[in-house]
Amino acid sequence: MSDLFRAIEQIESLEHTRTTNCPKCSAQKEIQQLDIYADCPNCQTHYKVRAFSANIEIEDVIAESLAWLIRDNKFDEIVESIKNAIEDD
C-alpha cells in the first residue's frame, strides 16, 4: 500500500476533535484536532498539545494543506472546484 493511500485513509478516519489532559491539574478538555495549544478550563494553564518534529503526523499534512488552500486568496475557488468534483462522482 502506498504512503499516499495510507495518508488518505488516516485523514478519512481522523476525528475533528480530541480530548486532552492538562499537565498541571489533569482536567480534561475537548479541543480541535489541529490545535497546537490549549487553555485549561480549571486552572487556566496554557499548554502545548502538539509539537512539530522530524516525525510528520497526519495533522501536519492537513495543516499544511489548509495553509496551501488559503494562500493567494484562492480558498473559495479551490473549495468550489472540489465540491464540483465530488458532485460529479
Image (cartoon, rainbow, N blue to C red):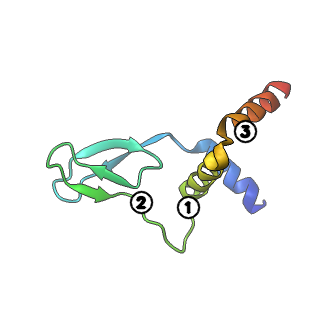
Q: Amino acid at mark 3?
A: Ile
Closer mark to the observer between disc 1 and disc 3:
3
Residue 42 appears left or right of 67: left
* Disc on res. 78: 3
Q: Is residue 69 visible?
A: no
Proximity of marks 2 and 3: CB atoms separated by less than 8 Å: no
Mark-to-mark CA distance, 1 and 3: 24 Å
Name the quarter where the C terminus is drawn: top right
Residue 50: assigned label: 2
Which element carries disc 3, helix, strand or loop? helix
Give the spatial CA distance, label 2 vs label 1. 10 Å
The answer to whether residue 73 is above or below residue 79 is below
Badge 1 amino acid: Glu
In front: 85, or 26?
A: 85
Q: Which mark is residue 57?
A: 1
Query: How far across and down, in percent of the image, does residue 37 sit?
Result: 35, 54
Please report the residue visible at 15 percent of the width from the left and 44 percent of the height from the top.
42
Q: Residue lying farthest top?
A: 87
Give the foreground label among 2 and 3: 3
Q: Within 10 Å of the Cα at label 2, are there few (<14), some (14-19), or many (20+) other Cα atoms?
A: some
Query: Residue visible at 20% across and 52% down?
Result: 26
Q: Find residue 51 and report its horizontal and vertical position in percent.
A: 43, 65
